[in-house]
C-alpha cells in the first residue's frame, strides 16, 4: 500500500528535523568540550599565524602556561575583536624586556624565542619594560613584536585570565597550513 503524499512529506520533514537537531547538538558539544573556530585578524602573530587563518581554540579545562598561544577577548584602544597572543609569563613571574639587546627575560632567564618574526624594536606605545605579573593575570606578546599591541602597552597590560577564551591549538584553514600551533 502506497503512502499518501502528505504523510510521506511529513515523514521526510521529520527525518530532516531529526538530522538538523542531531547536527546542532553535535556542534554545541564540540564547541563546549573540544573547542571553537576563531579567525586570526592581523599580522601580530607572524610567522606563527597568518592573517585570516582559521584556528581551533580549546576552551574547556584550559590553564594558562608560558609559551601557549591564546585567544583573548578584551577591548583596548582600537582593538575590539578577539586577539591572538603568546603567553610570556603567568602570575608571580617577573618579566624584563631589554630592547637594546632584543631580549625578553622571565625570572632572570632570557627566553629562547625562535618563533619571533624579527628582532624587537621599541615602539612608542610599548611602555612596559619590567613587570611582576599580578595574581590571576598573564603577560602576553605577539610573535611579530614590532607591530603587536600586547602587554607592553599599558592600555592592555597584564591580562586577567577571565579574558582568555582558550588556547589556540591548531590551524584548520587554509588546508595547506593545517596543523598544530607551537
Image (tube, rainbow, N blue to C red):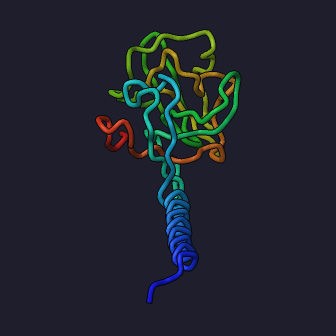
- In this figure, what is the number of numbered marks? 0
Q: Closer to the camera, 15 or 154?
A: 15
Q: Which residue occupies 45% across, 26% down?
A: 51
Residue visible at 43% across and 20% down in the picture:
103
Tell me the residue at 61%/21% (across/down).
Answer: 128
Q: Residue 19 in the image: x percent, y percent?
A: 50, 68
Q: Closer to the camera, 22 or 114? A: 22
Toward the left, the furthest residue is 176
Q: Is residue 104 left or right of residue 178?
A: right
Q: Position of residue 164 (x, y in %)?
A: 59, 44
Q: Position of residue 44 (x, y in %)?
A: 49, 23
Above-or-below relation of 131 to 70: above
Quarter of the rendering containing residue 126: top right
**Is residue 120 toward the left or the right of residue 112 in the image?**
right
The C terminus lies in quadrant = top left
Q: Image quadrant for the N terminus?
A: bottom left
Vertical relation: 91 (above or below) 40: below
Residue 2: image location, x then y, percent:
45, 85
Instruction: Using the image, determine if residue 120 lies above or below residue 116.
Output: above
Q: Quadrant of residue 68?
A: top left
Relative height, residue 34 to residue 92 (above, below): below
Amino acid at each position: 500500500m502506497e503512502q499518501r503524499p502528505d504523510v510521506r512529506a511529513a515523514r521526510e520533514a521529520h527525518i530532516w528535523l531529526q538530522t538538523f537537531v542531531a547536527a546542532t547538538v553535535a556542534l554545541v558539544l564540540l564547541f563546549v568540550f573540544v573547542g571553537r573556530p576563531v579567525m586570526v585578524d592581523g599580522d601580530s602573530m607572524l610567522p606563527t599565524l597568518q592573517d585570516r587563518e582559521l584556528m581551533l581554540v580549546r576552551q574547556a579545562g584550559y590553564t594558562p602556561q608560558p609559551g601557549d598561544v591564546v585567544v583573548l577577548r578584551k577591548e583596548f584602544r582600537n582593538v575590539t575583536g578577539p586577539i591572538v597572543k603568546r603567553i610570556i609569563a603567568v602570575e608571580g613571574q617577573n618579566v624584563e624586556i631589554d630592547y637594546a639587546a632584543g631580549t625578553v627575560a622571565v625570572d632572570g632567564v632570557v627566553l629562547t624565542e625562535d618563533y619571533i618574526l624579527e628582532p624587537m624594536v621599541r615602539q612608542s606605545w610599548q611602555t612596559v619594560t619590567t613587570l611582576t605579573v599580578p595574581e590571576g593575570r598573564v603577560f602576553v606578546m605577539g610573535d611579530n613584536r614590532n607591530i603587536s599591541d600586547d602587554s607592553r602597552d599599558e592600555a592592555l597590560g597584564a591580562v586577567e585570565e577571565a579574558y582568555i577564551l582558550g588556547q589556540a591549538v591548531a590551524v584548520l584553514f587554509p588546508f595547506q597550513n593545517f596543523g598544530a600551533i607551537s
